Amino acid sequence: MELFTKKYEITAPAEIHDRLDAFLAFFHFNGGHSGTFGMWFDGDGADTLKVDPPPPKEYAKGSQRIANAGHELEIATNQGTYYSRALDRKRPEYRYKDGALWKLLPGQHEDWKLVDDFERFAKL
């Protein structure tokens, strides 16, 4: 595997930097566990964070749309695929992949349904 170095400048309050340091420790000190790791972020404006250089613009639409699901856990995977999961497994799960939004109902495992009213969902 070829390794690359990429540098970011992050502008945020000290509390967010501390939270980000704790989050990055998951990866730096990982002893071989594979999983999904997360960091709390109050996205209604209470928490702020700016990244320079900004992430690629092609990731903007998916990240913004999946965050609108209003769940407690948003997950970014490879090539701009995003998931939104509620901690309460009785709520639906959402996936943004290849420019489309998909919904998985509780109790289903692989029966993803295309969300028809994509624009309405994006404004939630």
Image (tube, rainbow, N blue to C red):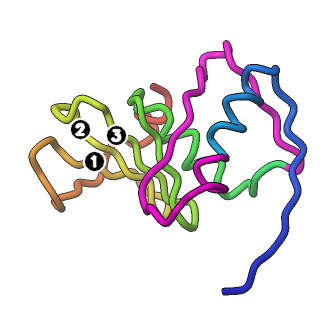
Instruction: Judge the density around disc 1: few (<14), some (14-19), many (≥20) Cα neighbours within 10 Å.
Output: some
Name the residue type under label 1.
Lys
Residue 63 lies, in percent from the top left, at: 57, 45
Instruction: Judge the density around disc 3: few (<14), some (14-19), many (≥20) Cα neighbours within 10 Å.
Output: many
Q: In the rendered structure, which disc, 2 or 3, sits on the residue that comes first in sequence?
A: 3
Residue bearing the label numbered 2: 92
Is residue 2 shown above or below 25?
A: below
Residue bearing the label numbered 3: 85
**Disc 1 and disc 2: Cα gap in Å?**
7 Å
**Disc 1 and disc 3: Cα gap in Å?**
10 Å
Residue 65 lies, in percent from the top left, at: 51, 40
Toward the viewer: 112 or 1? Answer: 1
Quadrant in the rendering for residue 89 = top left
Q: Residue at x 9, y 46 (%)?
A: 107
**Disc 2 and disc 3: Cα gap in Å?**
7 Å
Residue 114 lies, in percent from the top left, at: 29, 54
Indicate the quadrant containing the N terminus: top left, top right, bottom left or bottom right: bottom right
Query: Does the segment drawn in magenta span residue 109?
Result: no
Quadrant in the rendering for residue 16 = top right
Q: In the rendered structure, which disc, 1 or 3, sits on the residue that comes first in sequence?
A: 3
Q: Bounds of the magenta span?
A: 25-53
Residues tagged 2 and 3 counted as in contact (Cβ below 8 A):
no
Residue bearing the label numbered 1: 103
**In the image, which is nearer the foreground, mark 2 or mark 3?**
3
Residues tagged 1 and 2 counted as in contact (Cβ below 8 A):
yes
Is residue 34 shown above or below 70?
A: below
Residue 40 horizontal side relative to residue 53, left or right:
left
Mark 1 falls on what kind of element? strand
Name the residue type under label 2.
Pro
Is residue 16 shown above or below 115?
A: above
The secondary structure that most of the magenta stretch takes on is loop
